[in-house]
Image (tube, helix red, strand yellow):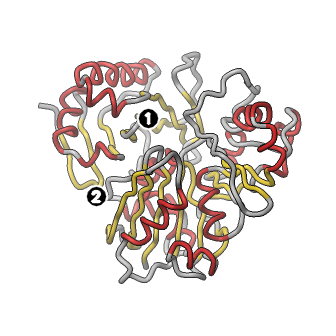
Amino acid sequence: MYALCLDIGTSSLKGAIISSDGKLISEGRIWYKESAVWSQALSELAGKLDRTFSVSAVAVSGNGPSFIPLYKEGTFGTPLLWFEKTDGFPIPGLSLYLPKALWLKEHRSREYEKAVQLLTADGFFNYLLTGISATAVYDDRFIPFFWTQETAEEHGIAYDKLPPLVHTGDKIGTVTEKAESQFGIKAGIPVFAGGSDFLMAILGTATLRPGQVCDRAGTSEGINYCSSGEKKTKNNAIRIMPHIVPEYTNISVRLPDSGKLFMQDKEQYGLRLCRLLQTLEQEGCPVEALRLTGGQARNPDWNQLRANLTGRRVLVPEIEDGELAGCASAAFAGLGVYDTPVRAAEAIVRIKQEYNPE
């Protein structure tokens, strides 16, 4: 079996056809010509991928928190992307999305009122392909980081404007005839819920055991540490969330604009990355190796330099874009090839190369 896996990034759309035993059959990447021209990029990407393989499923991951207004006539408003400043709208609690929705309501009121749904990035593609609005959460533990009806309505956000939440691996619908004519993806293929890009990267690098670390290195860089048991911290630079494995916790730190910094000043980049790792270790999270995913994972010189700068081993999976491997894990769990997305990731993710500090 083969899955079409898509990841909506900040600067590009990535896609791949991946087999149920973890082989990368075909891959492609489309850089956006304008900000977030995602539907056009999907058409171009679908045309680049090898069509000789019969795809059995589709799954999508996307950046966030982002919103795209969907209007009644099926058109879309201007996207409000995760990196756009929306300060001044704090909402108590864990939600990463509701402050964006509240900002949109206050600053783009006409778009907000006109919208029948506020689609997330992955939800946008789910809608384009199936005509059904749905946003993926890995499981119910992640719902507070998205939205609840109580919290939304408490802050004056219409709950019916927010898409239904479905679990990673759930079937959303099937590719419509309209989507086939627009994107060249065969009608009738089931579309399964993927999820947020960082969660799909954790899944797609098989960062599934305590002490393992997923290093998402691209436009920005996020370090996600798998920790046993519950964690608490007073450090605002650290984000604590559930892990995809229920008995564990995800501890994360972030380096914005890491790609630009790496190109401009590698020494400064190395110092800042090392500080992030030290921050984790001060919280009782020792880092022994980095499981790398993202654009930087494709450059052997960068991988060796990262190992040298940090003094840690760098592990690169066969499928270097963990978000795509995570989507494949979700799709094959949805198809019933594996019991769960985690079981799928354990079966299909393999480390191809290890870089040791020199």
- Which badge, 1 or 2, is on the more N-terminal residue? 1
Circle 1: is it few (<14), some (14-19), or many (20+) Cα within 10 Å?
some
Quadrant housing residue 24: bottom left
Quadrant housing residue 133: bottom right
Residue wearing tag 2 = 318
Residue at position x 44%, y 50% from top? 33
Residue 343 appears in view: no
Q: Secondary structure at mark 1?
A: strand
Q: Secondary structure at mark 2?
A: loop
User: Residue 56 at x, y = what percent?
Assistant: 50, 79
Residue 222 circle label: 1
User: Residue 96 at x, y = what percent?
Assistant: 66, 35
**In this picture, residue 96 sits left or right of residue 189:** right
**In this picture, residue 276 sits left or right of residue 299:** right
Nearest the viewer among 307 and 346 is 307
Residue 274 appears in view: yes
Circle 2: is it few (<14), some (14-19), or many (20+) Cα within 10 Å?
some
Residue at position x 56%, y 79% from top? 181
Residue at position x 54%, y 17% from top? 235
In the image, residue 3 above or below residue 270: below
Of the residues shown, which amino acid type is indicated by label 1?
A: Gly
The quarter in which the C terminus is drawn is: top left
Of the residues shown, which amino acid type is indicated by label 2?
A: Glu
Nearest the viewer among 122 and 235 is 122
